[in-house]
Image (tube, rainbow, N blue to C red):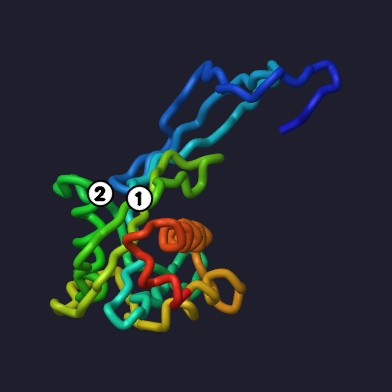
Amino acid sequence: MSSSNSIKPPSKPGAWKVHSEEIVFETPYIRARQQRCETMRGAIVDPYHVFDLPNWAAMLAITPDHHAVLVRNYRHGSQRVMLELPGGIIDDDDPNTEHAVARELREETGYSADRIFALPPIHPYPGRFRQMAYPYLGIGAVKAHEQALEDDEDLEVITMPLGDAFRVFADGSTDIAIAHAGIMLAARHLITSNPDLSELRAHI
């Protein structure tokens, strides 16, 4: 992408014009779009690639004794074992995102949460990816089921004190997904601001 001194900045950011688009790659999981775009400044960006990916949901689940339910999950893209929140893709037959995240928590960890609070949806990678993430906070999580992992899932369930979990996601001491770090930040804000969650504040 190049710039020119003759292209003046707009008064404020705005949507690009898409002059042409071609789907150059498609599978059940991902669709790649190649576009010819024009920015608000009049610059032509060609090609620009946009990727459609499934939406997903994840949950910070907290046990009655104030431990976070987490997973260590091998991610082949980075070829690293990452510390993550339980979660996954929202299936077509999930009636809503809360159902999807409760299902993922149960399948990946065997836990179920007594109370579930929605956190603000996020755009994990807005520059290139059309995808939404729906984070949740789960309270009163207890082990009530056996894991039901998919063939490509290789993960370990761990629990740690809630305060330790917040610190681990913030201090860079282990490999984490950046979107999950953002979810932890939103969960911390909800805990400190919601009167219904006051019993958790001493543990963060």
Residue 131, given in percent of the width and then of the height, sits at 40, 43
Residue 118 visible in the displayed image: yes
Q: Is residue 56 left or right of residue 6?
A: left
Which quadrant of the structure image shows residue 74? Answer: bottom left
Disc 2 packing (10 Å; few <14; some 14–19; many ≥20)? many
**Circle count:** 2
Above-or-below relation of 101 to 36:
below
Above-or-below relation of 1 to 92:
above
**In this figure, which residue is indicated by the disc labeled 1?**
134
Q: Residue at x 36, y 83 (%)?
A: 158
Above-or-below relation of 46 to 64:
above
Q: Secondary structure at mark 2?
A: helix
Residue 192, given in percent of the width and then of the height, sits at 46, 62
Residue 180 visible in the displayed image: no
Which quadrant of the structure image shows residue 127? Answer: top right
Residue 35, given in percent of the width and then of the height, sits at 52, 27
User: Pointer 1 and pointer 2: residues touching (CB < 8 Å)?
Assistant: yes
Q: Residue at x 44, y 35 (%)?
A: 24
Disc number placed over residue 81 in the picture, else none? none
**In this figure, which residue is indicated by the disc labeled 2?**
97
Q: Residue at x 38, y 45 (%)?
A: 53
* Distance from Cα at disc 1 to Cα at disc 2: 7 Å
